[in-house]
Amino acid sequence: MHRRPSINTNWRRALQGLLLSGLAGALTACEQPPLTPNGVIAVFGGVGLGPGAFSYPRAVTAEPAGSLFVVDKSGRIQRFSPQGEFETGWTMPQTKQGKPVGLSVAPDGRIFVADTHYHRVIVFDRDGIQLDAFATKESGSKETQLPTDVDVDDDGFIYVSEYQGDDRITKWSPDGQFVAALGEGPIEGVPLRRPAAIDFDRQQTLWVADACNHRIVRLSREGEILAVFGGFGDEPGHFRYPYDITVTPQDTIMVCEYGGNRLQWLSKDGRSLRVWGDAGRATGQLFAPWGATYGQNGDVYVVDSLNSRIQVIRP
């Protein structure tokens, strides 16, 4: 024989249901819903020269504290919060000859900018105060030509990718003195052609986006060739002008394809794990994306260059 619940029992059950449904609703409200089915959660920017707007953004990097730095074709560097709110900005010391195409944040928080058409690297603090400059173009083995990107290893040595004539990686001491040139000879029979971006992994090996060869190259810090994969094409594992490369928090490789209008995630042996994006101007589409980076929160910030915006995706 089943006993009928008392009024008090029914009331308690109803109250528990209301509390649970309210809690579930609150949790749902705290989650940022995607703008598109493929995971875009935010978009910021737009065409312009004012704070928060872009003139053809070219590169993005994130600092450990969470803020983002974006450089565009006007020669401006702007700092944003992880939510895309403009914080501050500054302009490169010279811009008449051309504008930077790459930047990175060192472990100590300094901002390294590949001042491409002035053949040098300029170092700033996070507020835009210039701290140093090195790799200035000069004769001999120290000459730097059209640097595209910069990264710093765990020992403080600085690596600079270059193209158009040199097409190599140069290594510099922590105080900006030339140490060595890497990747100058043929790699599997073909020399580097516009190494557009570089990034270190946790094992302190250097990953290179060899853009005009449509491939990825992995080097030791001494220049030993450890891996090469890719090739021109749209199928997974191939690339169309990889302009940026990032080692992910999961220790896989994320490649941004300028000519392929997509991001591609790969294992370290070159196996394609995921592809995101296609050509277009709608939210969730890309038009000549130049770069991408992971933020502190695990979201990915994509430089959608010819759409003059940053798209944020939650992979």
Image: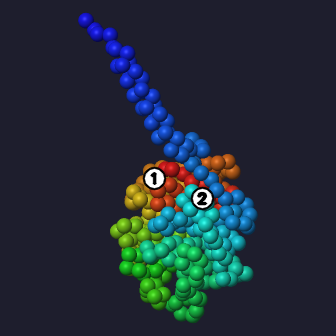
Q: Residue at the location (57% across, 54% down)? A: 312
Q: Give the residue type that dot 2 points to.
A: Gly
Q: Quadrant of residue 251?
A: bottom left
Q: Nearer the viewer, residue 101 or 241?
A: 101
**Residue drawn at point x = 43 percent, y = 32 percent:** 19
From the top left corner, tell me how far across and down residue 314 is, in percent.
51, 50
- Element carrying mark 1: strand
Residue 73 in picture, x, y percent from top left: 68, 70
Query: What residue do we see at 49% from left, 60% from top?
Result: 295
Q: Which residue is mark 2?
A: 84
Color encoding of the figure:
rainbow
Vertical side of 280 occupied by 227: above or below: below
Q: Residue at x 42, y 26 (%)?
A: 15
Q: Quadrant of the N terminus?
A: top left
> Which class describes the residues within 10 Å of circle 1: few (<14), some (14-19), or many (20+)?
some
Outermost residue on the bottom side: it is 139
Q: Is residue 128 visible?
A: yes
Vertical order, 119 against 197 (above or below)? below
Foreground residue, 273 or 306? Answer: 306
Instruction: Give the x, y percent position of residue 179.
Output: 44, 87
Gap between marks 2 and 1 measured at Cα: 30 Å
> Where does label 1 land, which residue?
272
- Considering the numbered disc 2 on the image, is that residue within a helix, a strand or a loop? loop
Residue 119 pos. (x, y %):
60, 83
Identify the amino acid type marked 1: Ser
Q: Is residue 54 visible?
A: no
* 10 Å crowding of disc 2: few (<14), some (14-19), many (20+): some
